[in-house]
Image (cartoon, grey):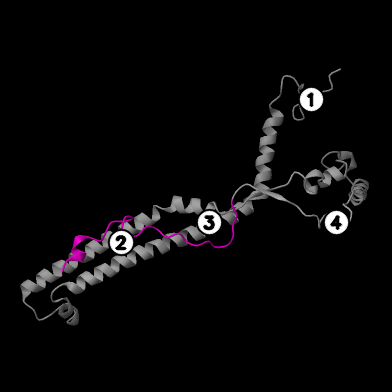
Amino acid sequence: MDTSPNCAICNAPAYPDCPCESERLQIAVKQAEQRAMEAKLTEIRDWVISHARQHILNAFERLSSARKQAHSAYLASLPYYSVYMQYSGHPPIHPAHLAQLQAQISEAHAELKRGVDADWRASVLRYPEVLDYFYSLVELRLPSERSPRVIEPPFAAAGYVDGGYEHSRIGKDGKKKKRRELSAAPVERGRSHRDREEHYTTIVGRVRGPPPVPTPPVQPGGYPRPPAPYYYG
């Protein structure tokens, strides 16, 4: 006599294999993952995004500050620029010199804007690398196969007699019996279940607080030098 159980979903014979149980298992696994991991994944995601965004802003600030300093130094080197600033853009100089100075200032401002845009783009394009780095610092752990919580989960200690395995036991009598069996479950001598030392297997890196922010490449070799007009004079 073949005692292989029929499909638990559609009651079809065990052979050939029925796909119902496999399909329902996949659904149940996804639902269990969502219940167990959704809040944790949200917390991890928020942590990673926060640190990655701060790193990108720091990198951009470092690059743009250097570019703005070069811009200010270039303007200060221009003839009549100090007089131009002293008289708020209306210095008592020859109109030809004034027109040339205004053109140089306008071109320098345009170059600065193009450079700042390039710095921002270069910083933002590093997001994939930065996100990978901070995600690599997160640790996920699996309990040891020798852990009492793995060997003797609550439903095993109860003899698998609960609402999920024996519907006829649902009610006061079933609940009382389950509590008695749980209380009678073996406890390791000298220590309670709560006090047992458990070992975990690390499968990814660990979050150890805010890590040092990696420094992006600055001059030379990382990003373009400021435009040629910055080096006049």
Residue indicated by mark 3: 48
Residue indicated by mark 2: 116
- In the rendered structure, are the residues bearing label 3 and label 2 in contact, judged by CB atoms less than 8 Å apart? no
* Quarter assignment of residue 150: top right
The percent coordinates of residue 191 (x first, y second) are: 86, 57
Left or right, 45 with reference to 57: right
Q: What amino acid is at disc 3? A: Val
Numbered disc 2: secondary structure: helix
Residue drawn at (41%, 53%) of the image: 126
Going from the N terminus, do you reach mark 1 or mark 3 first? 1
The percent coordinates of residue 188 (x first, y second) are: 87, 52
Q: Residues within 10 Å of mark 4 (few under 14, many from 20)?
A: few
Residue drawn at (66%, 37%) of the image: 27
Residue indicated by mark 4: 192
Kindly report the distance in space between the C-alpha atoms of the residues bearing marks 3 and 4: 37 Å
The percent coordinates of residue 123 (x first, y second) are: 38, 57
Kindly report the distance in space between the C-alpha atoms of the residues bearing marks 4 and 2: 62 Å
Q: What amino acid is at disc 1? A: Asn
- In the rendered structure, are the residues bearing label 3 and label 4 in contact, judged by CB atoms less than 8 Å apart? no
Numbered disc 4: secondary structure: loop
Residue drawn at (86%, 17%) of the image: 1
Numbered disc 3: secondary structure: helix
Q: Residues within 10 Å of mark 2 (few under 14, many from 20)?
A: some
Left or right, 125 with reference to 77: right
Question: What segment carries the magenta color?
Answer: 205-233
Going from the N terminus, do you reach mark 4 or mark 2 first? 2
Left or right, 232 with reference to 117: left
Going from the N terminus, do you reach mark 3 or mark 4 first? 3
* Disc 3 versus disc 4: nearer the observer: 4
Left or right, 57 with reference to 197: left
